[in-house]
Structure formats: C-alpha cells, structure tokens
Image (cartoon, coloured by chain):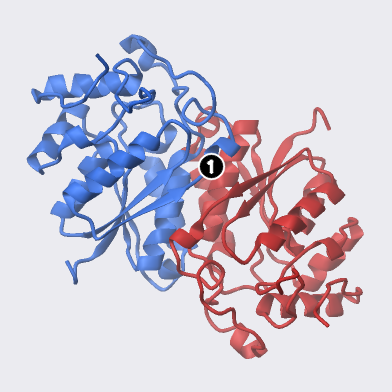
Chain colours: A blue, B red
Amino acid sequence: MGNAKRAVILLSGGLDSATVLAVARREGFACHALSIAYGQRHAVELVAARKVAAALGVAEHREMHLDLRALGGSALTADLPVPVDRTDGEMSQGIPITYVPARNTVFLSLALAYAEVIGAFDLFIGVNAVDFSGYPDCRPEFIAAFRTVANLATKAGVEGGRFDIHTPLIDLPKADIIRLGVSLGVDYGLTHSCYAPTPEGLACGRCDSCRIRAAGFAAAGVPDPTRYPE
Amino acid sequence: MGNAKRAVILLSGGLDSATVLAVARREGFACHALSIAYGQRHAVELVAARKVAAALGVAEHREMHLDLRALGGSALTADLPVPVDRTDGEMSQGIPITYVPARNTVFLSLALAYAEVIGAFDLFIGVNAVDFSGYPDCRPEFIAAFRTVANLATKAGVEGGRFDIHTPLIDLPKADIIRLGVSLGVDYGLTHSCYAPTPEGLACGRCDSCRIRAAGFAAAGVPDPTRYPE
C-alpha cells in the first residue's frame, strides 16, 4: 500500500464504521483509522475499534481522547439514562436523547486535522440517514456544508487540494449495510453498537442501537454474532 | 446577568481573545468562556485565560483538554522549532509553520457543542485576517461556511435557531485591537501571546507572535505590560 492514496476513516468500533473501513479498503485507499474516545460509556467501543482495525488491516490507527463530558448535554456523555425497550414509534420521534451536540462536526474536524497532517484528502464517516433520521449531523446537506468548510479551512485546500467526505452508508438500511460488510469480509462479532453495555462489555440488547442492529441481522438473513448477557 | 443572552467565547488567554471577551460583555451577553488546551507549549496560556476570565467577569469558564499532538503537524503541537527573529518579509510569506491543521474548525466545533448544551446561539472567536493573513481558517469565507455547518449540524439549528459567529477583530490591525481592549478595560498584563515562553512563563520577545504584539503596543501608543526575560 506504499503508493496508495491515503484516507482517514472515523472508526468507532461499531457496525457501521467497521463497514465503512472495509469499503475504503476495497476502494484501494491506505486507511488511517481515527478513533475518538469521548465519554464514559464507550471504552468498550475503543477495544472493538482496535480489533476491527487489526482484522481489516490499516496503515495506521490513532486514538484521541476528548472529554465531551466537560460540555454535558447527552445521554451518551452525561449521567442521563439511555432509553431502553422503546417501541418503533417512540424511536422514530424527533431527535433522540442520545444525540450528542455537534458530535459529527467535532469528529469530522479532528479527521480533517489528521488528514491534513498525513496529506490525505479523503475522509470516510459512517453516517446513516435511514435508521437515525433524527440526527441532524447525519444528513447529506450537513456533509456537503462540512466539505465546503474543509476546503476553506485548510492549508491543503488553499493550495488547491479538494477534500471529499465519503458517506458510503448514508442511504442504506441496516440490513443492506450488514450484507455489504459480510461481502467485504467484516467480522461483526468484533464490533460493538450498544449504548448501555454491561460491566463485562456485553451488549444490553434493549437500547435503540441494539434493537436496530438485531433487526438488521434478522432482515439481512445473517446470523447475529452479538454477545448478550445470560 | 440572569436573563442575558448567552454567548460562548473561545478564550485562549492571548491578547486577541481577551479583547473579544470584553467586546461580548459590552454587547450584553452572559459570557461562557471556553479554553481548549491542545498542546505542550501553551499551559501558560490556560493560566492567563483563567486570570482574564476572572478579571473581566464571566458567567462560566470551562476548560477542555485536546491532545492535538496525537495528530502532529505543527510547530505549536509537535516538536518543531518555533521560528524567531524573522524579518517582516519572512513573516508575511505564505502559511506559517505555526499553522495548526484545522485548528479553528476544531475549536469552533467544540464551541458549537458547548453553545448547544447551554442554549446559546452566539459564538465569539478572535480570528484576525490582518496580522496572520497566512492562516486560511481566519478568513471571512471560512467563518461564513462554518456558520452554515452550525445551522445544519445541530438540533438547535434544525429547530429553527440561527447561530452567529462573531469575529469582532477580523479586520483590525493589532494596534486597533489594543486600543479597543484598553477602552473596554482589558488588562493586557494578564494575557499571554508568546509561542515559545520561558520555563517561568515569560514571553520570549522573539517569536512572530511576540513581535506582532510588541509592535501593536508601540503603534497604539500604549505601554507594553508584557514581561520579558532579564
């Protein structure tokens, strides 16, 4: 991969970002994975990210720590309860409590900084506008606006480089994402999606993220490798 | 200030951001200052930020730690030498080595997250397109693009709120910034601008930032309160 174009892939350790990494590899990029640890609940995600990066093969995997809890404001970063056992109707209403203020803006900014340092112009992020339609920073118009910022904000952009923000999953239902990943050799048993894992790091099976994930495996006709308690 | 509109002010502890905080106060905002510690050289800036916040009076002052050194790429975050004793011609050529990749994008993203948590729509940042014309993320077109991102990225924006990014210093020469701050009661003796401070936290007097600052005081006809070695 010595002469391959470099790309930065935001890798959370979840199902979506693992699939995105596999897509970036298939497209021939030398993959520089960036994992951002930003709260108290997701240490287990970082472990998953390391396993995914090692299994899929990356040129480099960097981890940054970001104490978004200092700003508060979300069930994923503050001491608010993660909702469980919600009905589909409840899940689709409005912007979820698990929304983290400006999260993807912050993550893409850090990915942009990393990209500029390593001379990359391709950023990959696993946003999805289907299952989590309530998140404003998963929409195509947000991604397009951030791309404009990237080209204006950077030395690389001023010097004529053009950044591209790749969102290969943005229109895919979860089942299609899973089928895509399986076709690319992703081992979803290494990934972690749960918002409220047990102390041992197992998925709760009851939060929105667990339920969307489990429904995706069922719809894809793929055995669910997720480990649940009991 | 109980009913005042809230604003988030990016406060580095430098001369510019202290002036910006004073401007935001004059405009009647309840000021929520955010300081972001991002590298090895600027611990002394955080101390200055605390003094400035206390002296000018803020509703709240938050500090975040961000290890941009994990991404490398700048004399301000990596182990590259800060240039000193450059001529004016050298200083004005191209993008300085002290440019930190995507820095203002990252900082504005974090300010945006903080603003959304506290219900603020006004962000203040001390960018300046005069003295540091080489920094792409100090230009008005960058600020305008980030404002578009802010309105698209956030729950508050989707719900109809409109963010504003205030850049009161963007067109001002350093001397005018200093005159403005003095008129608003800023004690510049509390601020810190040096890129390469001594172990005791004194300004080196030789880096670009020190030289621009000293020239600004001279041009403004204001006594320079900066403490230099010897």
Q: Is residue A96 left or right of residue B187?
A: left
Query: Based on the displayed image, in which of its 4 quarters is residue A44 positioned?
Result: top left
| Helix, strand or loop status at disc 1 | loop
Front-lying residue, B202 or B21: B202
Mark 1 residue type = Asp
Mark 1 chain: A
Front-lying residue, B15 or B130: B15
For residue A2, above or below residue B124: below
- Viewer can see residue A170: no
Query: Based on the displayed image, in which of its 4 quarters is residue B182 positioned?
Result: bottom right
Q: Is residue B106 left or right of residue A3?
A: right
Quadrant containing the C terminus of chain B in the rendered view: bottom right
- Kindly identify the residue that appears in the image at 33 percent across and 9 percent down: A87
Which residue in the structure is indicated by mark 1? A67
**Mark 1 Cα-neighbour bin, 10 Å: few <14, some 14–19, many ≥20:** some
Q: Is residue A89 left or right of residue B216?
A: left
For residue A150, above or below residue A73: below
